[in-house]
Image (cartoon, rainbow, N blue to C red):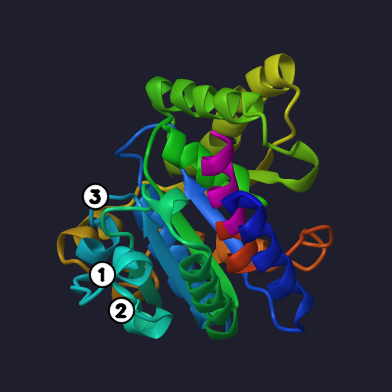
Amino acid sequence: MDQAEQLRNIIKASLQRTRPLARVITVTSGKGGVGKSNTSINLAIQLKKMGQRVIILDADFGLANIEIMFGAIPKHNLSDLIYQGKNIKEIITWGPGNVGFISGGSGIAGLSNLSREYLSYIVQNLEELDTIADIIIIDTGAGISDAVLEFLVASGEILLVTTPEPTSITDSYSLLKALNRHPRFSRENSQVKVIANRVSGPEEGMDLFNKLNAVVSRYLKLPIDYLGMIPYDNQLSKAVMQQMPVSLKNPSAKSAQAFEQIAGALMNKDANENLIKRGMAAFFSHIVNGKKMG
């Protein structure tokens, strides 16, 4: 029995136990500098205000965008759980608004070399994350890399952040093209939702989505949905400089209200009728199995 099959058996056993499953939402972008991490943080805070327990996993390995924006320094990170034997509660840092986050540290490059016993330990810890959080937001790296694609393939719900800049729209298309070509991507079990950031208003946001959707539907035949827009806002820029999410610093700011609307759309029961909650253990299994097959 190879290690990938061993892990599948571990996950299968874990899923047979009756327990809650967290909703895993992956936030991504075709290029850097479009406000992806800011979107992850502010959506997390708005969802928390709506009564959801939220944890962000900073999967932009090697960087520390989430902790910088939160103004909080984590004692431990995901690498400490995987390689140093820390448990899941030890690696969660609680930031402003009582939103938890897990720093990715150096990443998960060596997972395929771990023993069955240790993988089982990691899965058990990730299972516990499903009892701590209702929603887990994965903040990926920017651009098209194998690491980003692995997270997107493992996720059933993808939020794609883009801006009106032509390069941002082009790079968003390129990311979706790479995802669509991935051998393990299942369009039937995945939802791609677009957020238009730094637009002048609803009209420009819709126009941006229509431009992207036109080429995606024509050349990729991939269904994507419009989730909403975030207007350009000086208050948001000021909040970033002060390392405080605008949703907490200035809840009446137009960007904060836009984040609230998008969070509301995410919680809309009708829109989520076909959404499958996978939980973190299954999400993790998908990534590790992909590494074994790659």
Looking at this view, is 127 or 96 the one in front? 127
**Residue at far front of view:** 1
Q: Amino acid at mark 3?
A: Gly
The residue singled out by tag 1 in the image is 70
Looking at this view, is 159 or 86 the one in front? 86
Above or below 79: residue 97: below
Q: Are marks 2 and 3 in contact (CB under 8 Å)?
A: no
Whether residue 17 appears in magenta in the rendering, the answer is no
Q: Which residue shows up at 54% across the image and 30% down it?
A: 208
Whether residue 199 is visible, yes or no, is no
Residue 117 circle label: none
Image coordinates of residue 43 in percent, x first then y, are 48, 64
Q: How many other residues sit within 10 Å of disc 1, few (<14), some (14-19) or many (≥20)? A: many
Q: Are marks 2 and 1 in contact (CB under 8 Å)?
A: yes
Q: Which residue shows up at 43% across the image and 30% down it?
A: 144
What is the CA distance from the residue labelled 3 to the residue labelled 1? Answer: 17 Å
Name the N-terminal-most of marks 2 and 1: 1
In the visual, does 237 lie left or right of 210?
left
What is the CA distance from the residue labelled 2 to the residue labelled 3? Answer: 20 Å
Name the N-terminal-most of marks 3 and 1: 3
- Residue 25 image-quadrant placement: bottom right
The residue singled out by tag 2 in the image is 95
Q: How many other residues sit within 10 Å of disc 2, few (<14), some (14-19) or many (≥20)? A: many
Image coordinates of residue 49 in percent, x first then y, are 51, 81
Name the N-terminal-most of marks 2 and 3: 3
Q: Amino acid at mark 1?
A: Phe
Q: Which residues are magenta?
A: 285-294
What is the CA distance from the residue labelled 2 to the residue labelled 1? Answer: 6 Å
- Nearer to us: label 3 or label 1: 3
Q: Amino acid at mark 2?
A: Gly
The residue singled out by tag 3 in the image is 62
